[in-house]
Amino acid sequence: MLGSLKTFIAGLTGDARPRNPRDDGCRLATAALLVHVASADRELSQPALRNLHCVLKSRFRLDNVATAALLDAAAAAERRATDLYHFTRRLNEVLDHDGRRLVVGMMWQIAYADGRASEFASHIIWRAADLLGVSARERIELRNRSAAERGMLANQWNRSRTAPLNRMRRKLDIDLVFPIKDEVSAWLMCLKAELLFEAGVIDVDEKCIVLAHAAAFLDQAPGKAA
């Protein structure tokens, strides 16, 4: 059991010892499954290929040339294969349970590359995991982990995207809600919020707060006039 896992980890870490054909077959089978997931409901796009390249390079500790060669070979193998068993059989021969779980986790990582796993990709992973002997509970756990990791990356991207806007807002000393004296100033505040939103300086929540503030004044205005 430990031997097969060590074999796989050696492949993942780019061990400098002489390469074993069994390791090459394991890498190819893993990469082919990832290609199959990435192309589950569409042709392989350039962003999808870049993501596959990144995942394979990172997991197997390959250089760019070796990663590209593995990806090309995997795409060709995936086109020739008639079923998933062609690849899962190879992995079952080489890997122990932890190694097979790792492969399923990589498949979910590819499926969630766009932020949401498609129904087709999920179905493929479910069937492959079944052939690899990974339980339903483990599949769900691995799926949730990949989705959570993708969500954290998205949040980091959102923070990096909004940070310049926040700096701009502080630099301009933008006061979204200023005193409303009459209906004209209320409408001017709404217009200001709309323009800032269109310019990307404030987000939709901030715009709604301003509009709600102005609407509250306008709702009370007739009563004040009376």
Image (cartoon, rainbow, N blue to C red):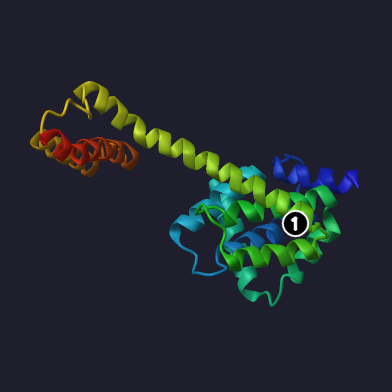
Q: Nearer the viewer, residue 101 or 23?
A: 101
Residue located farthest toward the bottom when viewing the structure as drawn: 82
Pinpoint residue 147: horizontal percent, then vertical percent: 60, 48
Asked if 225 appears above or below 88 in the picture, the reply is above
Asked if 3 appears above or below 77 in the picture, the reply is above
Q: Quadrant of the C terminus?
A: top left
Residue 23 in sight in this render: no
Q: Residue at x 45, y 55 (%)?
A: 47
Pinpoint residue 64: horizontal percent, then vertical percent: 54, 47
User: To which residue does mark 1 refer?
Assistant: 26
The kind of residue on which mark 1 rests is Cys
Residue 62 sits in quarter: top right
Q: In this rendering, would 90 be left or right of 80? A: right
Residue located farthest toward the front when viewing the structure as drawn: 226
Q: Residue at x 32, y 42 (%)?
A: 204
Q: Nearer the viewer, residue 142 or 179?
A: 179
Q: In this rendering, would 171 be left or right of 97? A: left
Asked if 34 appears above or below 40 in the picture, the reply is above
Q: Residue at x 81, y 47 (%)?
A: 98
Q: In this rendering, would 211 be left or right of 182? A: right
Pinpoint residue 88: horizontal percent, then vertical percent: 77, 64
Q: In this rendering, would 23 be left or right of 115? A: right
Q: Nearer the viewer, residue 35 or 23?
A: 35
